Each structure stands twice: as C-alpha cells, then as structure tokens.
Image: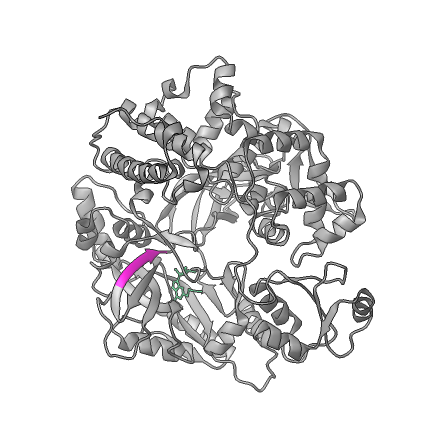
Amino acid sequence: MSKPVPVEDLSEADARRELARLATEIKLADAAYYKEDDPHLSDADYDALRARNAEIEARFPHLKRKDSPSERVGAEVSEAFSKVTHGVPMLSLDNAFSDEDVAEFAARIRRYLGLSDDETLTITAEPKIDGLSLSLTYEDGQFVRAATRGNGQVGEDVTANARTIEDIPDALKGKSWPGRIEIRGEVYMTGEAFEALNASQEEAGKKIFANPRNAAAGSLRQLDVAITKSRPLRFFAYAWGEVSESFAKTQTEAIETIDAWGFVTNELFKPHDTVDGLLEAYRDMAERRAMLGYDIDGVVYKVDRLDWQERLGFVSRFPRWAIAHKFPAERAVTRLEAIEIQVGRTGTLTPVARLTPVTVGGVVVSNATLHNEDEIARLDVRPGDMVEIQRAGDVIPQVLGVVDAHEANRAPPFEMPEECPECGSAAVREVDDKGEADVRRRCTGGLTCPAQAVERLKHFVSRKALDIDGLGAKQIELFYGHGVVKGPQDIFRLADRIEAAGLPPLSEWEGFGETSARNLFASIDARRTPPFQRFLNGLGIRHVGETTSGLFARSFLKWESFWDTVKKASEGDDSAEADLLSIDGVGQTAVNSLKDFAAEPHNQEMLTDLLAEVEVEDAEAAASDSPVAGKTIVFTGTLEKMTRDEAKSRATALGAKVSGSVSKKTDIVVAGPGAGSKLKKAEELGLQVMSEDDWLELAGL
Ligand code: IVH
C-alpha cells in the first residue's frame, strides 16, 4: 500500500472519492469480521481505515456520506439486513378488552364523524393473527420488496427470505392492480409446523422456540435464506400501505380484491352492521380458536368505508378506525416466593412478585407485578401463598389473587418499606391538591439514589431516546458501578472518565477487547447530535415522554428556544408558561414537571455539561407541503362540516399547530357561528379570520 496523501492536502473531489472508497472497504471488513467470522484485515489496518475516514470527515463535514462508517458500528445481525423506510408508517392497534370497550369504540367513531343514529356504521371483524407483520411491495404487478415492521417507521429488508414463502405471490394475478402497491399482512407458523420444527431442533441440539410467533420471527430473519426456506412459514394479507391509486371503496371490497390478486386472506373476515354483530363474531372466533391450527390472540375490527377511515385518521400510534378486541388472558397458579421492591427511574417503588416458575400460555413466568401497596392490601397476598397469575400478550404478568390461603401458617401481611431499599432515603406517598395520597410510594433521594440514577441512565441510552448501540442496561450498571458514568454527560467523556479514575483502558476490561471497545466509542460518538424529541425524552422528566417530547419538538423546532421558554416559565414568566401550554396535547402536569426539573440546580448543571458534549439537532416542521403547514390555528364558534376533534387532528396532520387561545402568535382564526371573545381578540390583533368553508378550501380538505 502506498503512503496515503495527508488529509490537509486533499482536494474536495479527492476527499469525496476517498470517503466512498473507505465506506466500501470498512463495510467489507465488517462483513468479513462479523458475518463470515473471517477478518481479512489486522486490527491495526482496520483502525487506520476508520481513523482516516474520521479525519477526512472532520475536515469536510459536508461530504459525510449517508452510509458513513462513523454512523455505523460493526454489523450486528440487524445490520445484516438493510433498512427500509416505510412510505406509510406501520402502526399498531389500540386494544379493547370488554364488550363495553367495543361499544365505546363504535360510539367514538359515530361522534367523531358526526353520524346520526339512523346512519349505518359497517365495521368488519377478522382474527388477530399472532405472528409478525410484513409489508410487500409490488411494482407493475411484480413482487419487488419485503420489509419487516421494525419500529413502525423503518424496518428491515427481508425480500430474499419472503420469496421463499409460498403464500406470497411473485406476480399479482389479473391486470387491474395499481402500478405500485404495498400489501401488508402477518407471517405466521401453524401449530403443527411449530411442533415439528421444535422436535427437529431438539434432536439437532439447537434452539427451542417458546411459541409459534417467536419461531416465525426467528425463521424469517435469517441471513441464510436456505434456513427460511426450510421453515414452513405462511402469510395472511389483511391491509395495505402505500398505493399509487385507490383500488376499493370499502375494506371488504379491498380484501376481496387482494384475495383475487392471489393472496391468502382470512376466511373468517366479515362485515357487520351492528355492535352486537361484532360481539357475536368475537364469541364465534373465541370458540373456534383452538381448532384453527394457528394462533390468534383476538379479533380486529375495522371501519368498512375507506373514506371514513381516511377522515378518522390516526392518534399517536393507533388508527382511530380500527381496534383489537383481545381474548382474555391465560392464567395459572403458582407459589409466591417473595415480594421484592424495584426502584424505577422516577423513584417509584414497585413491588414485584417472585414466583416459582410456571408456564402460562406457552411462556415461562417467574416474575409478576403487584403494582403498589394498595393492590397488595386489596389482594392480601403474602409470601408463601399460592397465587393465581395471568398473562396477556406481551404485557407484564399480573397477580390476580390468593388461592387456598392457609390461615394458620401464613406470613404476616406485607408491609411496604418507608425507606428506599436502594439508598435509604425516605419513601413517601405524594398527596395531591385534593388531599388524596398517590397509590405509588416514591423515593425522595432523586439522583443521589443509585437505583434512580441507573434507571435514568438506562432510559437515556434506550431505543426511544439516544439509542446508543452496544450501551445497554448491563454496560450502564458496570460503568455506574465503577463510578465512571454518573450522569448522561459522562457517557460522552467515557474514555477520560475511565482514565481519570485510574482504571485501565476499556479495551482491557473483561468482556470488552479492542473491537468492542472501539465500537462502543464509535456508537457513542455517532449520537453526539441527538434529535430534539429523542434528547428531551431521554432526560426522563416525569410526564414528558416520547409523545409529549415530540409535541414540543415539532412546535419549537429549536432546542435553545424551547429550553429558554422552559427556564423563563420556571422563573415565573407567565407568558412563557402560556406558550408551552398553548400547544395542543400539552397539559399543565407536563409543564409543571418541566418547570420543576429546570428549577433544580443539579439538573441545570447536568444539562450544561451535557450540552457541552452534544449538539441537539433541530426538529423539522411536520413534513407537509400544505399552505397551512407551520401555521398556528385557533378554531372558535361552532363548526358545521366536522367535529372540533376532527378539525384539530386534520389540521395537525397537515403540519399546522392548533392552539386553544388567540395571541400575537396565532396565524389563522377559523370562526364559526357563535364565535365570541376569541373572534373579538383576533380582530383587535388584526389576525387573519376565516369561515369554516374558507378554511376547508385553504387546507384542501
Ligand atoms: S390491521 C393500522 N389486522 O396486530 C392497522 N393487524 O397490534 C394495521 N395483526 O402490527 C393492522 N392480525 O401485526 C391488522 N387482521 C389483522 C391483524 C393485525 C394481526 C397485528 C399486526 C399489527 C398488530 C397491531
């Protein structure tokens, strides 16, 4: 290898070429190392490639590639599949657990759409398949790509694996399909195939799967397509994503069409005109459940008319037009061995039941939540008791009650500690404005409590916050235990903190080694420009989670202007507080909690230190080319074409901000009949006022 040109002598064109070459070389080296277990470069040569890449990027930051190796750490299994961004997010479904929930679902839709009682609301019912969802793209009728759901926004490309599934047609039948269409559905494994697979796995001394769903997921996400092919996976089509043109007017018609194109759709799918009809379908499917040959965990209801589905839209992660009616949870009886206390990120003490392991619905359960001390008292559960537990889907198992309490030799009633078991600080129940004690007991130690500090750090690096690869619960505990990471800022100074503590370099720690230490530092560095929403969520402020953080991010766009407003509000500036509260979906509880956080000197210090290490990335205004995007809108008076809720959510969907009060910052006031003081104020301020019809036209609704 000839000696490389010094970076300071590179022209821009040279630099661009070199970055491309380095990206490829590093990718190949990673693949050889991780996937083929056959590194073709020495550690030193590999390091030199990465160092040169970093040096060039530092001199020419604008040339940094989308697939830059500095953004990527090694090639874990998930890196083995390339990423696919879903054109239409793959959402999940809200749950209904009772007949009343289903009636309320239908009533809510009627209210939202403003339907009169005599208008028929047709809703379809079909089984909820317990598998994993998959999106299949067809262009000109040909299958071109399969992607897993992933996090709903970005999934994994599993095209080659999906081609091995017989239920997935290579080409659509007929001629009348949209030029481009994405079919969605569930990959699953039949009970019979699952049993046979586990039997042969066992014989070969390989991994046994806990249930058919895990087996299906494990079989689809195989690097070796031959393995996927050898596993009998099936596919039910039940929905669609991006389409180049509409192809049906109702869900029923769409499913019939998809069936005619050659997919397998579920034979139990059926439309119903009444809630009673839906409930009857639910009971019918619950009865057939054991005989279907594949696992289902409930019934999915969907509004049949697609124009109504569109009007109903989405609320956070769920469509308003569909819901999953879950089957009752599976239950079992076992012994409660002990009640232990866990301290969470915000200091809540949660009693956890340690159980003699028992199988419930195919999964071994050894822990269950007891929620809080009132719940323990209500159930009167004591260590040593036989208890009934239940498990529903992926939720944490619950203790339902004591069976057969043997009075004579029972342990005394459980008492909740009044001191935090982790730090010894007082643990108290907060009393609200009405003088009622909160059900939760909370440690008052704040960040001096190691459990809270550790849980907050875990949250900070977790998937929905900074999402630092290779830095999980285990590593946080290790670093915290050695005193090198006490707050989030320390993560970004890890090497220095290790050195300052007089510890050997990370690469010499047990369980690390050259490559993983290097990868960890690289993945930390890759997160030095966290997006606004993730950063705020990561701070772990009570009542300011992922959704609320997103509302602030989309409204303020810039971290500095947001935090400035929070600081002012915490110093008693009412207009700053009003700015925070004017965001639709943000309530007083979240704002109070932000103010409390900002007022604490140790939080201020932590933030200053942290912001010296990272630069928060501005949020983008909701992607929309609508003329109302980015505008602040106030609706007042009566709306005649749609309900207030619908107006608000459709405006938000177009990228507008909906506010409840008129101020200088308002762009448009939509006034219907009966508008009063808000209209007056808008006129005083000289704001743009329009009728509902003008608004609908402007918004293109
Ligand atoms: S419809 C926008 N229909 O359940 C709604 N989902 O909890 C799209 N699922 O991620 C989903 N059977 O993986 C729909 N008949 C069915 C389903 C179904 C199973 C899964 C799907 C989804 C999850 C939501």
Q: Residue furthest bottom?
A: 118
Q: Is residue 205 above or below residue 630?
A: above
* Figure quarter occupied by ligand 1: bottom left
Indicate how the structure is coloured in the image: one colour
Q: Residue furthest top?
A: 502
**Quadrant position of the N terminus in the picture:** top left
Q: Is residue 227 above or below residue 70?
A: below
Residue 546 visible somewhere in the drawing? yes
**Quadrant position of the C terminus in the picture:** bottom right
Task: Please give the range of residues in magenta.
Answer: 144-148
Image location (x, y in percent) of residue 88: 43, 62
Decide whether residue 146 is among the magenta residues.
yes
- Say which quarter of the image contains residue 263: bottom left
Image location (x, y in percent) of residue 519: 37, 30
Q: Is residue 168 left or right of residue 342?
A: left
The residue nearer to you, when weighing 589 against 158, is 158
**Overall secondary structure of the magenta stretch?**
strand
Q: Residue at 42%, 80% (x, y): give it.
A: 249
Decide whether residue 254 is among the magenta residues.
no
Q: Residue at 48%, 37% (x, y): give it.
A: 527
